[in-house]
Structure formats: structure tokens, C-alpha cells
Image (spheres, grey):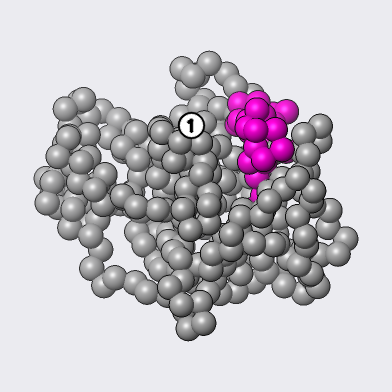
């Protein structure tokens, strides 16, 4: 793992915001594990991978969306190799996390997995495989082409909240629309900072469209109207588990250069209730 000794987001905040506002905004930053292609898997600390074939317990059925077909294996991570103690969410200390998604290979993208449509939730899954459970490499079901395997290494990175993230709205609730936090100069600097492929565990999601927390919160509340005040409160209860970006090396393209997001409530994560994760995706 590599880690910068100088946090660029702190410097960025103080360069564009008044001192007291900068400190309040910095208080909203969250640590994250940034996952990047291992230039040399033979010497790098490999913590996971995109694509390839998953290793599953013999008695574990391949994840399937009933009525649609098997999901595609997207990524897996060796929790024992992750520096998860640096995060503010309780990832498992060992075992494997594996992510699956119905990516449209079987139906040319007709069926979409959406947080406000409970009948589609089976189209995205997270499996947690404890370290003491024997596993074997599993071939993909008929009709599914595995993604090219890409080994991933990790570095600790501080992440900023999206400017309309519920935590930002709560912290600056009484601020006018022309408040510096929402100013063009600051937001453009944040945009420049976050450019590039972003695979990550924990921290703040980098949305393509709007705050993903609102999308999963509304779905968890059985899709009330968007102006329902419960959505803002519920959105604050959800944390990013994993973000998997469009990636040319793994031949992964989510819509129009989009990203996949899995979120979970911290109490469910602590109890290893990965069946309670919520999924959403966004594209340009």
C-alpha cells in the first residue's frame, strides 16, 4: 500500500474556502481504499482483482436473478490484505468479498437493476466468504463471458463528499446558494482532483449524476416522493461499501462510462449482513 504524506484535499479546501468553512468541510472527509491496477502483480501487494473467475465454496450456488439468469462476476477482494483499520467502516478482517452484477450480457441490457424497483434487486449481489471455508475456481455459466482479469493494489486516500451529499446539506443547511462550498472555483478544483478511474472500498462515492445515497435511501423507504423528508435522514444512514468504475483494462463499461455502487448501513456491515446491501449505478 502507498499513501501520500500530504492530503491534497486539506490544501484544496484552504486554498478555496475561508478558514472556518474549510475546517467544517474537512470534517466531512472520509478515508477510503483506492484500488488501482497492479503494474507488476509479481511484486506488488495484490489485494483483489477485477474479472476473471471467482473462487466460491463448493455448496455456494452461482448468484442468479430468477427469471433473468446468472449474474456476472465483477470483482473480489482479500480482506486480510486490505488495510481496513484505516477506514471508518468495519470491513471484515479476513475472508473474501465478491461482487456480482447482471450486466446485460444475456439480454442485451434490457433488464436494469434499480434501487427503486425491489423486483430487480436480485440483479446485484455481494458474497462474503469466510477465510476458513474451502473454495474452488468456478467456471462462468453458459452465455456469460468473464471479464479480463486485472490484479489490483491499494492505497489509502481521503475522499470528499459530493457537493449535494446529505452530510454537506446538513452541515451547511442554513447557507445561501452562493456559499463558497458550492462556488464554481471550489467545485471545479474538486472535479479536477477526482478525475480518473475510481475503484474504491469505503469513503465517499464519486457519483456520475447525483448523490447515490439518496437513490438507495429512497429505495429502502419503498420509493416515496422525492420531496419526502425521510429520504434525507435515511440517506445519512448509508455508507459506500464498494465503487467499481468503468475500466478499459478489464473491458468493463457501465452504460456510458458509468460506475457501479454498493452501499450498506454500518450496523449491517458490522453484523456481516451483506444480503442487506443496496445497489445503484449511474452513467453519463
Q: Is residue 95 left or right of residue 18?
A: right
283 vs 125, nearest the viewer: 283
Residue at image coords 35%, 44%: 161
Residue 46, compared with residue 67, is above or below; it is below
Residue at label 1? 214
Q: Is residue 24 left or right of residue 90?
A: left
SS class, disc 1 = helix
Residue at image coords 17%, 35%: 184
The prevailing secondary structure element of the residues shown in magenta is: loop
Residue at image coords 39%, 66%: 156
Q: Residue furthest bottom?
A: 43
Does 145 appear in magenta? Answer: no
128 vs 176, nearest the viewer: 128
Q: Is residue 4 left or right of residue 56?
A: left
213 vs 101, nearest the viewer: 101
Residue at image coords 24%, 48%: 192
Could you say where residue 117 lies in the image, as x and y percent from the top left? 65, 26
Residue 274 showing in the rendered view? no
Residue 45, compared with residue 27, is above or below; it is below
Q: Find the magenta span and give its range.
A: 99-122
Could you say where residue 274 lies in the image, as x and y percent from the top left? 68, 51
Amino acid at each position: 500500500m502507498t499513501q501520500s504524506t500530504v492530503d491534497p484535499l486539506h490544501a484544496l479546501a484552504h486554498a478555496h474556502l475561508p478558514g472556518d468553512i474549510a475546517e467544517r468541510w474537512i470534517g466531512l472527509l472520509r478515508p477510503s481504499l483506492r484500488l488501482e491496477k497492479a503494474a507488476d502483480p509479481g511484486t506488488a501487494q495484490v489485494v483483489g482483482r477485477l474479472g476473471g473467475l471467482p473462487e466460491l465454496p463448493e455448496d455456494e450456488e452461482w448468484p442468479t436473478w430468477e427469471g433473468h439468469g446468472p449474474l456476472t462476476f465483477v470483482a473480489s477482494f482479500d480482506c486480510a490484505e486490505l488495510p481496513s483499520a484505516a477506514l471508518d467502516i468495519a470491513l471484515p478482517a479476513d475472508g473474501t468479498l465478491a461482487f456480482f452484477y447482471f450486466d446485460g450480457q444475456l439480454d442485451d441490457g434490457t433488464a436494469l437493476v434499480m434501487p427503486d424497483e425491489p423486483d430487480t434487486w436480485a440483479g446485484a449481489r455481494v458474497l462474503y466468504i469466510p477465510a476458513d471455508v474451502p473454495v474452488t475456481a468456478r467456471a462462468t455459466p453458459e452465455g456469460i463471458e468473464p471479464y479480463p482479469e486485472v490484479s489490483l493494489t491499494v492505497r489509502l486516500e481521503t475522499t470528499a463528499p459530493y457537493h449535494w451529499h446529505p452530510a454537506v446539506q446538513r452541515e451547511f443547511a442554513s447557507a445561501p446558494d452562493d456559499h463558497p462550498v458550492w462556488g464554481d472555483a471550489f467545485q471545479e478544483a474538486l472535479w479536477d482532483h477526482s478525475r480518473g478511474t475510481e475503484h474504491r472500498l469505503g469513503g465517499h462515492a464519486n457519483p456520475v449524476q447525483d448523490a447515490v445515497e439518496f437513490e438507495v435511501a429512497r429505495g429502502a423507504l419503498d420509493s416515496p416522493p422525492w420531496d419526502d423528508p425521510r429520504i434525507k435522514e435515511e440517506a445519512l444512514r448509508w455508507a459506500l461499501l464498494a465503487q467499481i468504475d468503468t475500466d478499459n483494462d478489464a473491458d468493463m463499461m457501465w452504460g456510458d462510462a458509468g460506475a457501479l455502487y454498493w452501499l450498506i448501513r454500518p450496523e449491517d456491515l458490522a453484523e456481516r449482513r451483506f444480503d442487506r446491501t443496496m445497489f445503484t449505478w449511474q452513467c453519463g
